[in-house]
Image (cartoon, helix red, strand yellow):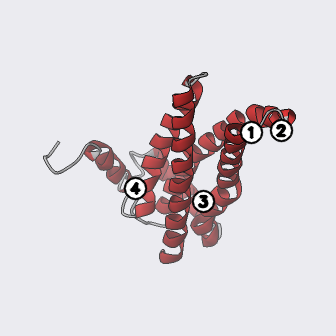
Amino acid sequence: MSAGGGPFEALVSLVKAREACPPQVCLEQLLLDNVRRAQLPEALFHWGHPAAMLLLTLPLALGGAYLGWQIKLGNEGADPQGVKRARALHPPLMIAAGVLLVFGVQSGIASLLMQGQPLLDSAHAKTAGALLALYAAQGFLGTSMGGNGAARLAHTAAGTALVAWLLGHTALGLTLGFQLP
């Protein structure tokens, strides 16, 4: 690794190589070529990823974060059933949002490849990798915190920061969508 390359230089090189992978070598390119031959509307490739992320992933993540705050702030004496429901729904909503984020990265990559756009040149692409890493760390913290009050507070603070990151990432994605031809 070169001195100025940073810790992700090898990963960046692999992703950049993916952009130019010839169909004879790259199964992904064969799939993309077959999809291109289907002559689907360009709008599907341009706006399909953002629409799916806005309609599926973002509401799950925001709903899960809301439930997390209901758990954090919940007064079990005032509404024990509400807090109990929030405790039951928060983990599966956040897991579903995480799974959709992973698939969302793949659909974003496919969208850019279908449009002939570079993969890592946008701020949105750069924040996607960090978002996945933060989400994984947040999930690990959530599953390992147990009854530790400091860990619960860290989970809440990190989750709130993650929601802010997700909203910024969303804004960058929409900006990218309007900038691409």
Image coordinates of residue 70 in percent, x first then y, are 72, 42
Q: Earlier in the sequence, mark 2 or mark 3?
A: 3
Residue marked by disc 3? 49
Between the C-alphas of marks 3 and 4, the distance is 16 Å
Nearest-to-viewer mark from 2 and 4? 2
Between the C-alphas of marks 3 and 1, the distance is 35 Å
Q: Which of marks 1 and 2 is nearer the N terminus?
A: 1
Label 2 SS: helix
For the residues bearing labels 3 and 4, Cβ distance under 8 angstroms: no
Label 4 SS: helix
For the residues bearing labels 1 and 2, Cβ distance under 8 angstroms: yes
Between the C-alphas of marks 2 and 4, the distance is 38 Å
Residue marked by disc 4? 126
Label 1 SS: loop
Q: Is residue 74 above or below residue 165?
A: above
Residue marked by disc 2? 82
The amino acid pointed to by label 4 is: Lys
Nearest-to-viewer mark from 3 and 4? 4
Between the C-alphas of marks 4 and 1, the distance is 36 Å
Image coordinates of residue 65 in percent, x first then y, are 65, 46
Residue 119 appears in which quarter of the rendering?
Answer: bottom left
Q: Residue 74 carries which label?
A: 1
